[in-house]
Image: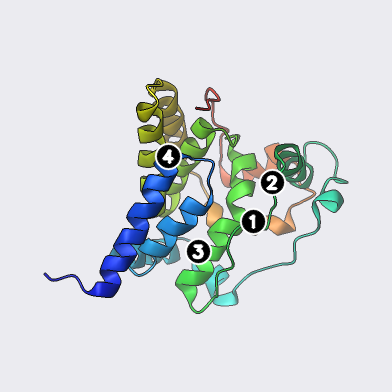
Amino acid sequence: MEINSELKLELLETLKGFMHFVQDPRATTSVFEIQRGLSHQAISMKNVEHMLAQPGIQQLADERYQPQRPSLTTLLLHPPGTLGHAYASSLLSAGFDPDFFEVIEVIGKGTYLDLRVRQTHDIWHVMTGFGTDLAGELGLQAFQLCQIYSPLSILIVAAGVLHAMGLGAPIEPLLRAIEAGIEIAATDTPMLAVRWEEHWGSDLDELRAGVGLRTARYEPYSV
């Protein structure tokens, strides 16, 4: 089957983003490159179908649920041990901007779900216990792969392991983190279906119990 020129360009952008991530996993723009390259691929359409088939996600997409998020300083006023406080603390301590991601124009359910995954990414970090070190990111991507069958997650996991191999660093801690993400991925409620912004003041342990989520046990690792 002949590949048309537009598809070739998208595949090249995917490859470019993949190699950029292999070179430097801290360069978050590489993730956007991979996602843009994948956006019109058949595998991404299957990914959307899988997400919409899960309980609660179809309704979320129909409503285009996008609540206003309070500022990090406002969220920090919630008591320690709550989602809002933990989320704000983690972003502030890491110096992360919660709005760092590229703007996605919502033109259908697929683009809405892409945006929703980005908006809740750091919430998933907090809920699962995975940090933002390389092992934590790969563990979360493995978790996300099992939850929503994301082709982006597959490429990020592979690129992260290749990054360590290229440096001659051990990959076993990364593989254990990936395994930890897979182990806790079978939650009672799909993580993407949860309206997290309605639970800023909720206790983290109670929230995890409510969706059937265990926190990951892994060894933080950066290369």
Residue 180 location (% of width, % of height): 46, 30
Question: Residue 96, which numbered label?
Answer: 2
| Residue kind at label 2, given as amino acid type | Phe
- Kindly report which numbered mark, 4 or 3, lies closer to the viewer in this rendering: 4
Residue 186 location (% of width, % of height): 45, 42
Q: Are marks 1 and 2 in contact (CB under 8 Å)?
A: yes
Q: How much space separates mark 1 and mark 3, taking CA atoms?
A: 15 Å
Question: Residue 23, which numbered label?
Answer: 4
* Res 205 seen here: yes
Quadrant location of the N terminus in the rendered image: bottom left
**Location of residue 58 with respect to 13 vertically, above or below:** below
For mark 1, give the secondary structure: loop
Left or right of residue 126, residue 152 in this image: left
Badge 4 crowding class, 10 Å Cα cut-off, few under 14, some 14 to 19, many 20 or more, is some
Residue at the image position 62 percent from the left and 47 percent from the top: 122
Q: How much space separates mark 2 and mark 3, taking CA atoms?
A: 20 Å
Residue at which label 1 appears: 100
Q: How much space separates mark 4 and mark 3, taking CA atoms?
A: 25 Å
**Location of residue 193 with respect to 45 vertically, above or below:** above
